Image (cartoon, grey):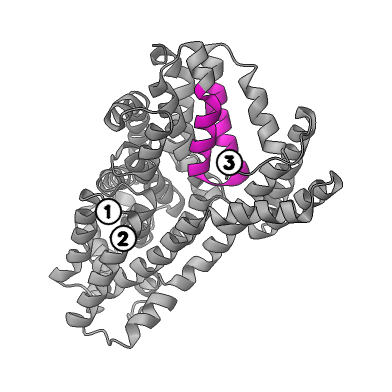
Amino acid sequence: MNSIEAKHNPSLAVSIIFFIMIVGIISFFMIVLETAPHIPILIAIFILIGYGLWNKISYQSLQHAMALGAGSAMGAVFLFFVIGILISSWMISGTIPALMMVGLSIISTTWFYAIVFAITAIIGISLGSSLTTTATVGVALIGMAGAMDASLAITAGAIVSGAFFGDKMSPLSDTTNLASAIVGVDLFEHIKHISLTTIPAFIISFIAFAILSPGKSYANNNIAQYQDALQATGLIHWSSWIPLIVLIVCTIFKLSAFLSLSISSLVASIIAMAVNKFPLSDVPKAWFEGYTGGSDFEPVNELITKGGMESMFFTIALVLLALSFGGLLFVTGLLPTILDALQTRLKRTRSIIASTAGTAIGVNVFIGEQYLSILLTGETFQRIYERAGLTKKALSRTLEDAGTVINPLVPWSVCGVFIADVLGVPVLAYLPFAFFCLLSPIITILFGARTAKK
């Protein structure tokens, strides 16, 4: 999207005023009126189109910018479709029910939130994808939380925190590779350097989740009822673990996320037909509409009725709107003006790091795309870091600390919308408990300057 040429050069004051106005509109509609995020984003698009036409930018240029912005989402759109298929195929193969069964068997309510955080962190590192971790293991864990009468908001916060810790620290992660590549840092040097801020954030988060975890007296006695109902579905078999193993193997061999998820989905569907006797004619239906549970225990039906391409339409529509909105921010010159202003006003190490983090967070908020926050912020600040004698590793670390982990905290962002849809917990509900995501930018701003010099 950074290839979009600005057709207007507004003043810095005008750019800031428009940003504040747009944030105010989005916040009012989502928080006060509780509307779907699509509506305020669409209204913001109308406002930017009006602003562009007022400043004599042709509608063709505005439309072209929106098309380029939406076009940059095509990779994510196809990935979302496959994730919808993955969830439904993992349901019919018994993979997600099997994960729920094991979790209910081995995880006590003592330190529950801390264990959820640790499990998703480990799996996130193994898979290299926060969204895959959330859509698979996260779905199982949120189901366990419901069975235990634990807080869904805190559980979702622990899942998001662990998944994005794994995403940051995994050499298989797209964002980790992007952050290191955009500034020219060796991948493993980058991972080693981000551990300086990531490990403290992990430790503090683990302690916080342990403190918040319910005690044994808080446990719900119907866990056995959930286990019996899951077993009665007839979905769980030893072969239910094969799709998960296939996914891990694919990521080890560094296949793309699209191919890894597709192969795992196909294997899961074959297992569903061969082992669970799922009719061939029902597989395409499950891929599109998702799986519908048929248990006699309604709470379990709610847990396993998930997935399908259709369940991704809400997310995909919002992604396309958000990135079209981002294209308009560029062509109208509003975002380039603010980014250019930053380059001439920063000299002190801490202010440079704080501004880097603020820019990465700002792009996440205004555009809703974590990859774009890394790309734009990295390209904007490279010269500033070189001029100030700061290391490239400090820049790549800050991009991850404030770019990657903030996206799930923005209700209209790609990750935020996806996670809220998959887990069934609104972003604003789990946001206060996503401790790792909240701590990462704070720690990098407070202590990042100590390890930023060459």
Q: Are marks 1 and 2 in contact (CB under 8 Å)?
A: yes
Give me the C-alpha separation between circle 1 and circle 3: 27 Å
Q: Residue 255: percent from the left, percent from the top?
A: 27, 53
Residue 88 in magenta?
A: no
- Asked whether, in this view, residue 380 is left or right of residue 209, the answer is right
Q: Residue 407: percent from the left, percent from the top?
A: 50, 44
Residue 141, located in which quarter of the rendered image?
Answer: bottom left
Determine the secondary structure under disc 1: loop
Where residue 259 is drawn, which disc sits there?
2
Determine the secondary structure under disc 2: helix
- From the image, tell me which residue sits under label 1: 255
- Asked whether, in this view, residue 197 is left or right of residue 35, the answer is left
Residue name at image x 45 percent, y 39 percent? 404
Q: Residue 366: percent from the left, percent from the top?
A: 63, 43
Q: Nearer the viewer, residue 41 or 223?
A: 41
Determine the secondary structure under disc 3: loop
- Local packing at callout 1 (Cα closer than 10 Å; few below 14, some 14-19, many 20+) is some
Residue 219, located in which quarter of the rendered image?
Answer: bottom left
Residue 380 in magenta?
A: yes
Residue name at image x 25 percent, y 49 percent? 254
Magenta range: 354-382
